[in-house]
Every structure is written in C-alpha cells, then in structure tokens.
Image (tube, coloured by chain):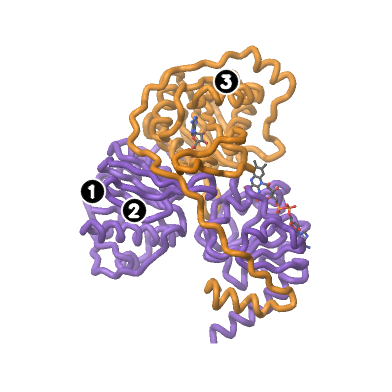
Amino acid sequence: MIYAYIENLNGKYKNSSIEIVSYAKNIADAQGDSVIAITFNAEDSPEILYKYGADNVYNIKNEALKNFDPKVYASLISQLIEGNYIIFSHSDESTSIAPFLVKEKEAVYITNVVSQPLSFSPFKVKRNIFSGKGIAVVETSNPFLIITVALNSTGVKENPVSGREINPLITIPDDSPYKVESIEESDSKIDLKEAKIVVSGGRGMKGPENWGIIEDLAQVLNAAEACTKPVSDMGWRPHSEHVGQTGKNIAPKLYIAIGISGAIQHLAGVNGSKTILVINNDPEAPFFKSADYGVVGDLFEVVPKLTEKLKSFINNKKI
Amino acid sequence: MKILVAISCVPDTTSKINFTQDKKKFDKNGIQYVINPQDEYCLSKAIYLQEKQNAEVTIVIVGDLSVEPVMRKALAIGAQNAIRVNIEPIDSQNVAKEIAEIVKQGDYDIILLGKESLDYNGGMVPGLVAAELDLPFVNGVIGLEIENKTIKVTRELENGVELISLDLPVVLAGQKGLVEENQLKIPNIRGIMAAKNKSLNVVEAKFSDLKLKIDEYEKPKSRSHVVLVDKENLDDLIQLLHEQAKVI
Ligand SMILES: Cc1cc2nc3c(=O)[nH]c(=O)nc-3n(C[C@H](O)[C@H](O)[C@H](O)COP(=O)(O)OP(=O)(O)OC[C@H]3O[C@@H](n4cnc5c(N)ncnc54)[C@H](O)[C@@H]3O)c2cc1C
Ligand SMILES: Nc1ncnc2c1ncn2[C@@H]1O[C@H](COP(=O)(O)O)[C@@H](O)[C@H]1O
C-alpha cells in the first residue's frame, strides 16, 4: 500500500495534497500497488481523491482532532498503515507529523522531494537543496520510506479509479497537552503557498500606501500577494507575506515581481515558479536575468495599465 | 530554566553554489559559514529570555572542528554554554539523535531549533528531535512567552496564527518573526571578550550508520532568456502569458 496524507484547509483538500495523491498513484502503478488516502476532518467529497487515483479513503472525523497535535495525528496514521511508503506534502503540518512516524517505523525520512522516484531498488529520488540553488539525488535501501514532496514540483494528474471510503476502527488518544487559546485568521483570501498566481511587491513600491496597486492586480488575477524581506521588515506588509530564503518558499504557475531588484536571497524563495514576470524601471535590475518576461518601466504607470487590460481580457475570456 | 538552541552552520546567503566536477561533493571553496538565519532568530529570542526571565542558554552544533568560529559567535551573542558533537552532519536523522542525546543529559525545558536549514532545506531535525524525546512539538513558531511551567506559543498557519499553551518541556521550530528584525542580537565587544573565556565543550558522536546517502548533486535548469515587452505593448504581454506561457 502507498499512503497519502491529505491536508485540508477549512475542510477543503489542499491543492498540494491532490499533488500528493498523484505522486502516490504514480508509485502505486509502478509497484502494482494501490493508494490509500488518509484525511482528518475534511469536508470535501472523497470523490475528488478517487479522481486522482486514491483507491481507498480513510476520512476520520472527530471533534477531538480539531486541535492539531502532531503526536495524536501520527498515532492515528500509525494505526491505519501497513505498507512501506507514506507520502506527505512538504508543509509545516506534515513535517510536524511525519517525524513521529519515522521514529516509530524506523523509516528513512526524505523531505523536500522534487521528482518522482528515479528507481525503486535502491530507491532514488531528487530533493531540493540550497534553497533551489541545487538538487541532490539521494539513495536508500531501507524498506520503509516516509517522503515529503515539495509544493508544485511534480504536478497533479487525473487518474480516475472507482474508490471506496472506509471507516476504520481506531482509538483516538484524548490526553493531548495542546491547549489552543485562540486562532486569528488573516484577511487574505488566498493562501500564498497554494496560490496559482502570486503578485509580489518590493521596495520599489515606495510605501504601504501604494499597495492598492498590488491588490488590484492580485484581485483581477485571483492571485495571492507577497513581498520582499525589507518590505515586511519595515512593517509595510505582514511577515507572513515575505517570500525568499528567510521567508516562504513558493512555486506558483506565475510570479509577478513588481519593484523588486531580484537579490539572490529573494530569488531563492521564488525560483521554483513556472513563469516569472518582472516589472522594474531599472533595465539593469538583476531580476531580469532570472525572469521569463519583463517590462522595463515605472510600476506606477505600467501596473495599473496592465491591471485594466487584464480585467478586460479576463472578462472577454469568460464570455 | 534551561534553553537549548540547536544551530546549524550554513553557507552565507549570498554564496554561489557549486559542486565538484564529478558531482559528488559540494564545493566549499570560498564559502563563508554563518549561523543559519532561522537559528539566529531562535538564539536572539533565547537570549532575551535569559536576560529577562533568568533562563540559561546553551547552544549545540553537530559538526566538525570547522564550526568553532560560529560557536564563538553564538557565545559572543550571549549564550552561556556551547556544545559541539564531533561529527560531520551528513545525515539529518543522526543529527537529530545526537541532539536528543544532549537534551537527555542536560534536562532542558525548551529545545529551540530553526524551522529549516538553508543548506539542506530538510525541515527534518526539529520534528525528529521531538519524536526521539517523545515531547510535544510546535512548528513554524513566531512567538513565545513563558509563565512558570507553561509556555504560550504562537505558530503561523496558512490562514492566520494560532496561540497554543503547553507544559514544559517542549521542542519548538522557530522562524523569522520570533524576534523583530531590528531586535536580532549581534555580538558586542563585551560579548566577544566574554566569549573568549567560555569553553567549547566537545562530545563524541554516537550515531554514524547511514541509511540515506547522496548519490550526486545537480544544478537546477536555468531559465531561458528573458523576453522583454515594451511598456506600450502590454497587450502583447497578455497574449504571451496566455498563449505561450499558458499561465492566465
Ligand atoms: C541573511 C539575509 C537573508 C535575506 N533573506 C531575504 C528573503 O528571504 N527575501 C527577500 O526578499 N530578501 C531577503 N534578503 C534581502 C535581500 O538581500 C534584498 O535586500 C531584498 O530582497 C531587496 O528587496 P527589494 O527588491 O524589495 O528592494 P531593492 O533591492 O531596494 O529593490 C527595489 C527595486 O525596485 C525598483 N524600482 C524602484 N522604483 C521603481 C518604480 N517606480 N518602478 C519600477 N521599479 C522601481 C528598483 O529599480 C529596484 O530594482 C535577505 C538578506 C540577508 C542578508
Ligand atoms: N548539524 C546541526 N547541528 C545542530 N543543529 C542542527 C544541525 N542541523 C540542523 N540543525 C537544527 O535543525 C534545524 C532544521 O534543520 P534541517 O532539518 O536541516 O532543515 C536547524 O535550523 C537547526 O536548528
């Protein structure tokens, strides 16, 4: 069995978890095996997971799991599995749960994986190192493997199967030491790590009062917003939007960098993006060397114009 | 209260990353090693707790002799004690076991690690340390406060932040935000002088069997040349994004 741990946000499966199902399905096909997806308190229909190749879905729903306790989650997964591969997303949640399973199963733990397995005996796979400035091919002969797959690195693929939902008998430990005191939700609607398009602003924006320019473009594209480190350090934007080597690592389909010079530490967090568009008034800005598309010009003039044009383009497309 | 901060030494963030011709090794030529940035936030936070709440801060590095300058820097920033586990840190699972051994011997209340090291980007060691010790673990920590034997931890969620309270001891993976940028501790003259008189404790490694090895290194594919679009022709840009890149 190949196990896929499915994360959800407000009950909906994350895109990154759909990617995990595709990943597991690919291994299962290569091994003549099947995929079991495990998910806690999700509200989405398991049909979605069948579509991407999950043969069985354990959808465990329990009030006691509302507070996230990695040890409790790990103990449940451990009660459910009898196979040699567990696939997770490379996320805070998964890298909190997985280590407890690694310890219990004496597994080899491979994180930040960016390729499908290159071979199975020995098991070989590529992983990200040096913030995307390098890749390592790693190898192990250990029979039990726990893997976390980097976001948007291997892609999703439809692979419909006639899946089945299973309600297993498990015991839920109810002595969690974690007491959640409060949760504060941010007002941004789109999760930065999950977003397909990200609009990002740097010091070229001149000040927080100009952020409407970024917001308008992001809204038209249904994109998440991001920023550079100095922008968050100066308090123009929250830390949670900071991308780069010391901030979030993202890999959207389209990254739009506005008024960002393209320092090496910034690039490290975004160079996994499929396509990069840079808008900067300095033709010598280093970012142009790492971009797919570029516009040399004053952002205060170019971006609002681009936003208007995109708005009509997208409206026309819908019709 | 005793706090252990685990520090990994990583190439300076501006480093050009190269591998040897045979692709078997990382080319250390000309590389400057620094405290992993996430660990710097953790260390600074720990030093504030030392100053204000009577904590005692110890740092631990798993590494060979070459990490000693970084240990001195951590002492100069204000750590009381420094421990080095003498082995090249090539396997994160072993690194975690070594750190767990140090914890077992030292009776620490808070074990603070960076969320991710900038070199191997594993995000592995903190959780593995917690699992080895069977202690509660919180990832992505951006705030912590201590009241007697409980700790209040703020962690980042995808869509906000969560405040959790826990009894000590705990293992935490910290990140940027734990202290503000302008509150990062840097060594001052007094700290540097004091560090000279502190000893670097060296303990021998216990775990060396390798279950995962690096077969070879590669450089990522570089992007093809940038296509520049005139700012008067933004319609062309939209067409390119739509038809060529297929991203809108
Ligand atoms: C240890 C360490 C870690 C770091 N980690 C990160 C990280 O994770 N993420 C990160 O982003 N940075 C990081 N940095 C900082 C990084 O080195 C750069 O300083 C930073 O990325 C620069 O941000 P910026 O592009 O917003 O600002 P600047 O470098 O000041 O660039 C502003 C750009 O805006 C352009 N501009 C100005 N006005 C206009 C206009 N009217 N129209 C169009 N363009 C305009 C300018 O030409 C310039 O290219 C780190 C640094 C260190 C030392
Ligand atoms: N060799 C090491 N010595 C001490 N601490 C380490 C070492 N490697 C990793 N760590 C700690 O574990 C964190 C995460 O590292 P990693 O799992 O490699 O991404 C780092 O930020 C450090 O706090």
Check if mark 3 and mark 1 are on a common chain: no
Write the residue at 74% across / 77% down.
B232
Residue A39 position in % (x across, y down): 34, 55
Residue corresponding to mark 1: A83
Q: In terms of image quadrants, where is residue B175?
A: top right
Q: Chain of mark 3?
A: B
- At mark 2, the secondary structure is loop
**Is B178 on the left-hand or right-hand side of A19?**
right
Amino acid beneath label 1: Gly
Q: Which chain is painted in orange?
A: B
Write the residue at 60% across / 50% down.
A244
Chain A color in figure: purple
Q: Earlier in the sequence, mark 1 or mark 2?
A: 1
Which one is in front in this view, the residue at disc 1 or the one at disc 2? 2
> CB of mark 1 within 8 Å of CB of mark 2?
no
Write the residue at 62% across / 35% down.
B30
**Is B16 on the left-hand or right-hand side of A150?**
right
Residue corresponding to mark 2: A117
Q: Chain of mark 1?
A: A
Q: In the rendering, which numbered label is found on residue B56?
A: 3
Amino acid beneath label 2: Pro
Residue A127 position in % (x across, y down): 43, 48
* Mark 3 vs mark 2, CA separation in Å: 45 Å
